[in-house]
Image: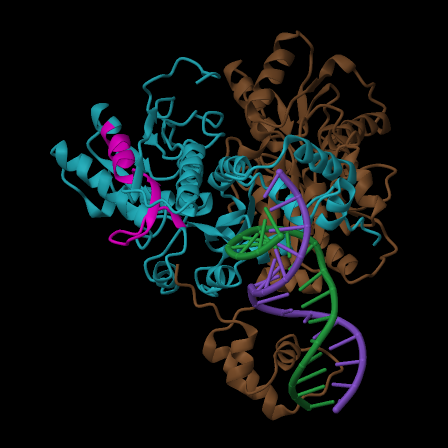
Chain colours: A cyan, B brown, C purple, D green
Amino acid sequence: MAVNRVTSQDVADRAGVSRTTVSLVLNNVPGIQISDTTRQRVLQAAEELNYVPDAAAQALASRQSQVIGLVLIRTPDQIASDIFLTQTLDGLIKSVHKAGMRLLIDIIDPEHQEETYLHLMRAKRIDGIILSGPRSNDESLNALLDVDFPTVLLGQLPGSQFYSVDVDNRAAAHNAATHLLNLGHRRIACITNAPLSYTAANDRLSGYRQALETAGVPFDPPLVRFAEFDPESGYEQMNNLLESGSDFSAAFVASDLVAYGAIAATREHGLRIPEDMALVGLDDLPFSRFISPPLTTIRLPAIELARIATDLLFRLLQGEQPEQKQIILGTELVVRDSCGAKLHGYAPHQ
Amino acid sequence: MAVNRVTSQDVADRAGVSRTTVSLVLNNVPGIQISDTTRQRVLQAAEELNYVPDAAAQALASRQSQVIGLVLIRTPDQIASDIFLTQTLDGLIKSVHKAGMRLLIDIIDPEHQEETYLHLMRAKRIDGIILSGPRSNDESLNALLDVDFPTVLLGQLPGSQFYSVDVDNRAAAHNAATHLLNLGHRRIACITNAPLSYTAANDRLSGYRQALETAGVPFDPPLVRFAEFDPESGYEQMNNLLESGSDFSAAFVASDLVAYGAIAATREHGLRIPEDMALVGLDDLPFSRFISPPLTTIRLPAIELARIATDLLFRLLQGEQPEQKQIILGTELVVRDSCGAKLHGYAPHQ
DNA sequence: TTGTAAGCGTTATCAC
DNA sequence: GTGATAACGCTTACAA
């Protein structure tokens, strides 16, 4: 592999200066005076030689890898259909690039190898970490806190000292349920997005309960089912619900993906949405307005979430210590056709 | 940040040996003789100190970063709803981990900064690259070839010397169209997944044409429309088709995602699928069996694709030069309800 | 304003 | 079998 091994020495030689000067110029070190002519000479030499500093050498000397780690804690099955991830990724990479950094991505199974991200840190492979889907039973997390490693959680860990960015799950669910209540529904089923050990799932369920309470509608446990992220589980739980003999006229499904499955189940039971049952989801995935019927749901600001998380991380990397440790983003009800509110045609520009 | 800065020297001290020995033991250097007792001592010392080698130092000295780059060439809009990506990611990370390596991910806009991945290579930040969505007008690619940088394309670049792994797009489309032809359809519209400058789109269109030809059905250009990856474009193109006055009883939509939009358009025109129009997609996204109607489509082996690509890359990294440069994976027709072939109920285990 | 020289924490090449 | 010692290519005091 005949790589053109251009080093800073080569640049220095060509520009007729020392390596130091090259480094100073190229890194644009502030508070240093370099004559404009040498600066130009160096820049030009680097340009001509197509010089790119060796990342490893740079990292070793500067103690900064210029890489941030995105660690996703999920089971493999969850990944494959996780669109929320692609949206996050999009936002993340843009911000990271803007800061001249790179993104290392890692997926770790919650069951095993929780240590993985500590390894990344200890090897100094990453300067900071964005952790998505943190679990409270993850002991390794403390190690991050102990050494004060720049960390931002995507999601929440109630009571922890971590910086975190999340969506207001409780309000989102409250909003969804309230929409159904406002339409006159009183028997409203709920299918969670995940088991309650996930804070997001728990919060969504309690948002739903709160909404019922506020409206003076009694909470009826048999009307609640627990899905597990994917449409399949939504399909099963809705079937289960329909076959349980419980009586309900609407359902709040705490994840669009799960809702897709639930809708399929409903259809198979010969029920029409929204005529026979109103349904509202949560996420507003890019396809949710194309399915049948176009899904009324709660929009989560995925890209903004990612942007804010990276911005926060960069501040940490620069040594700042922002006051606010937890950032909670608002959500928004998107009314489409699955509750019967808006039956007249599909709105492509919504 | 009080990081426990454990170096190999510390391990050496504790084990009462030299750094060299530590390196030899920890890296399990083959063909070297080390007494079992010292080996144990070193291992134990490392364990006790929680020693993790510094990635930068290791990379600098060994000239290997142990990181492979996944570079996605797409526009930002394409990313957000790209489920195929999540599936790929899943497969990729598993393989990469198995090899004890890491994954650096990068998205680059085809319009700009095509040089980005060269930068990664020149900075020696990555040992090899998996390039998804290569474009033939990308000059930078040659630089990879020139220096013989370990590269595997996810997708194809006809006539190039790159190693590549792809799905048999032509056969997939041929298969889809043939299914419709077998059901008796003769006027079959086609909405591509993307503009024809994308080889995949081009291949899919020509698979469709071929199928028609084989069946003795004339190819009718007005029946073809070009979408751009997302449901939105599918919606528009199907509208366009329906309003063009062209006569057709079936449609082959070369991407499930695009098909979702096309179905929405059809629905709005008061047409039922499959009763009024048969439709077959291509991709078999995880939701395609939950939408209404469950979509007949062609399954693409996303995870296997990723697995094979990484395996191939690892062979390149080890200096092998596999004979076969282009690997093409087969696809499979998945019959569901959108062509009317199987109207009796939904099959969750399909 | 620029150059000298000492790290950074490994791996790799030799001797012993 | 094991240990000095020299790279690896850069940053950064400290001098000049």
Q: Is residue B347 left or right of residue B130?
A: left
Q: Is residue C15 left or right of residue A139?
A: right
Whether the magenta-drawn stretch holds residue B7 is answered as: no
Q: Residue at x 56, y 83 (%)?
A: B42
**A53 in relation to B12, above or below:** above
Residue B348, above or below B222? below
Q: B8 or A155, which lies in front?
A: B8
Across and down, in percent, residue B57 comes to 61, 63
Residue B291 on image: x %, y %? 50, 33
Is A165 in the magenta?
A: yes
Q: Where on the picture, by quarter, is residue A257?
A: top left
Q: Residue B224: tell me if it is visible.
A: yes
Q: Quadrant of residue B322?
A: bottom right
Q: On the image, which quarter does residue A51 sit in?
A: top right
Residue located at (83% from left, 54% from top): A1
| Range of magenta residues | A151-178
Name the one closer to the observer, A101 or B36. Answer: A101
Name the residue rendered at 67%, 32% in the picture: B113
Percent from the top left, x then y, of residue A234?
40, 44
The extreme left residue here reads A216
Q: Position of residue B338 (x, y in %)?
A: 59, 31
Rendered residue at 30%/35% (across/down): A251
Count of numbered circles in the view: 0
- Residue B92 in sight: no
Quadrant of the drawing holding the N terminus of chain B: bottom left
Q: Nearer the viewer, residue B313 or B225?
A: B313
- Above or below, A31 relative to B306: above
Determine whether, in the image, residue B45 is placed left or right of residue B245: left
